[in-house]
Amino acid sequence: MPVRRRLFAGQRLRALRESRELRQADLATALGVSASYLSQLENDQRPLTSALIEKLASLFPVDWQDLGTDGTEQLVVALREASADPLFAEPLPPDQLARLAEQNPAFAERFVALHEAYRRTGQRLAMVDEALTTENPAADTAATARLPWEQVRDWFHFANNYVDTLDRAAEKLARQLRGRAPSPGTEAIETHLRQALSISLIYSGQSGIRSFDAEMSHLVIDPGQPAESRRFQLAHQLVSLALRDEILAVIEGAKLQSAASRQLLFVGLSNYAAGALLMPYDDFRRTARTLRHDIDRIAQIFGTSFEQTCHRLSTLQRDGAKGVPFFFCRVDMAGNITKRHSATRLQFARFGGACPLWIVHEAVAVPDRILVQLAETPDGVRYVSMAKGLVKPSGTFERPPRRYAVALGCETTHAGEFIYADGLDLASERSVVPIGISCRICPRPDCDQRAFPPSDREIEVDPDHRGVVPYRIG
C-alpha cells in the first residue's frame, strides 16, 4: 500500500488569503482552526490535512483551483463533485476521497469518467424525451430528427460552450488591436478591416443588421443599432475573415450532418470568436471575479452590452483557469428559450417554455430592472438566479423593438462570488422557490403552476373533486 504523501502548500495558502484581503484570524475562523495553526500551515511547518483541503475547495472553489493544485488534488476535487451528485444519499468523507485518489488513482479516474458519461447520457435522454413528447400528432422518426439549428445548439452544449483554439486566437488578435485598453475599440476594428483586410465599410440601414459582399469586399452595417451591437457586428466580420482557417478546422471536426448546420455553426463560431475578441479571456475573467460578476460594471469596462457580458461569463471554461460555472439563457416574450447554455447541473427545456415559476418570465415584462431568485430544482440543487428584461431598439418606427430577458445564475456553492446573491437569505427554506425544467419532465406532484402533467406519469381524475388542476399525478 503506498504511503500517503503530506501536502505542504503554505505559499498557495498565503496567496489565497492575500488575494481575498483576509487576515489570518479571518481565514482561520472560516477553516475552523486557530490563527497559530494557520500560521504554521502558511510557513510549511505543518501539512494540509484532507479535511482542510476539502474545506478550502468548498469555501474557495475557483481560487483553490487557480493555485496550481497537482494531479492528485485535482482528482480529489473531481471525486468530490461526482460523489456530491444528488444521485447519492450523501457525499463521501474527505479522508476517504483522498485515500481513494492516492491509493487507487486509476479506479478514481474511471469513476469520475463514468459519472461524467452518466451525466451526459442523462442530458441526451432528456433531449430525446422532450422531442418525443412534443405536441405533434404526426411525429415520427423523420419528423423528430434534429433540425440544423438544434444540431448546432447541441454541439455548443456538449463542447461546454468553450472552444479553446478560437478563444486563444481571438485573445491574441485582441492584443494586437486594443493597445492598453481592456477591449479593442470600434475605431481599431474599423481600421484593421480597412487596412489589413482591404474591406470598405459603409453604414446604411438598407441591408439588414450586417451585410458583407465578399466579391466586392464591401461591409454594410446598420447604424440604427445600439453602439455595442454595431461594434459586435464589426467584430463578427473581422474574426470571420481573420480567423477563418481556425473556424473551418473546428467545423471539420464537428462532423455535422448537413450543409445548413455547418453554415449555422460557422455563424455561431464567428459570434463566439467576436465575444472572445471584445472580452479577452484572462483580463475579462480577472475583472469579473474582482467585481464579483457585477454585469453592469463589467460591461462598462469592456464596452459591451448586458447580454453580451452575461453570455461571455458562461463560456469561461478554460482548463486551469475556469471561471464560476454559470448557466445563461435568453427568453422572448412568448417564453421561448432562444439562447441557452449551462456549465452547472441545471439543464434547459429544449422544446416549449421553461418553468413559469422561474423569475426570468417576470423579467421579460419589467425591462431594465434586475430581479433575483433563490430556486431549487427537483434534484435538490439550489441556484441563485439573476434576470433582467431588455429592449433592443430597431432604429425605426416601422419595426417594433425586440423585447426579451436574459438570466444568469450559479449554484449556491458559488454565491459568495455572485454579487446578486447578497440580498438573499440562503439559509431560509421559505425563501426557496421550487422550480422545474419544463412541465413535461417535472416530477413535482403539487405545483400550482403546472400547465400539463409529466409525460412519464399516469394521472388520476376525480369528477367530484377539483384542485388547481383537474387531475392528480399518479
Image (cartoon, rainbow, N blue to C red):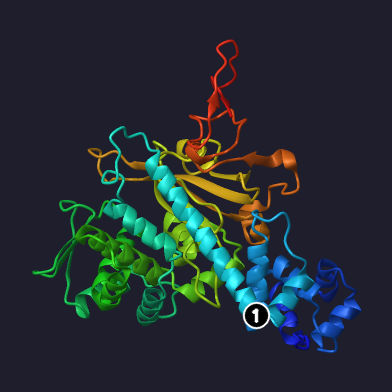
Identity of the residue furthest to the top in this view: 464
Identity of the residue furthest to the front in this view: 1
Identity of the residue furthest to the left in this view: 215
The percent coordinates of residue 121 (x first, y second) are 48, 58
The percent coordinates of residue 227 (x first, y second) are 34, 58
Residue visible at 81% across and 85% down in the picture = 47
Q: Nearer the viewer, residue 333 or 21?
A: 333
Quarter of the image holding residue 194? bottom left
Quarter of the image holding residue 53? bottom right
Residue type, label 1: Pro
How many numbered markers are drawn? 1
Quadrant where the N terminus lies?
bottom right
Q: Is residue 26 above or below residue 404?
A: below
Residue visible at 57% across and 64% down in the picture = 115
Residue at the disc numbered 1: 105
Residue visible at 44% across and 79% down in the picture = 180
Is 217 on the left or on the right of 281, as rendered? left
Q: Nearer the viewer, residue 116 or 43?
A: 116
| Whether residue 331 can be seen here | no
How many residues crowd mark 1 within 10 Å: few (<14), some (14–19), many (20+)?
some
Residue visible at 25% across and 61% down in the picture = 257
Please tell me whether mark 1 sits on a helix, a strand or a loop: helix
The percent coordinates of residue 106 (x first, y second) are 61, 79
Is 245 on the left or on the right of 298, as rendered? left
Quadrant where the C terminus lies?
top right
Q: Nearer the viewer, residue 341 or 34?
A: 341
Is 329 on the left or on the right of 70, as rendered? left
| Whether residue 253 can be seen here | yes
The percent coordinates of residue 381 (x first, y second) are 64, 51
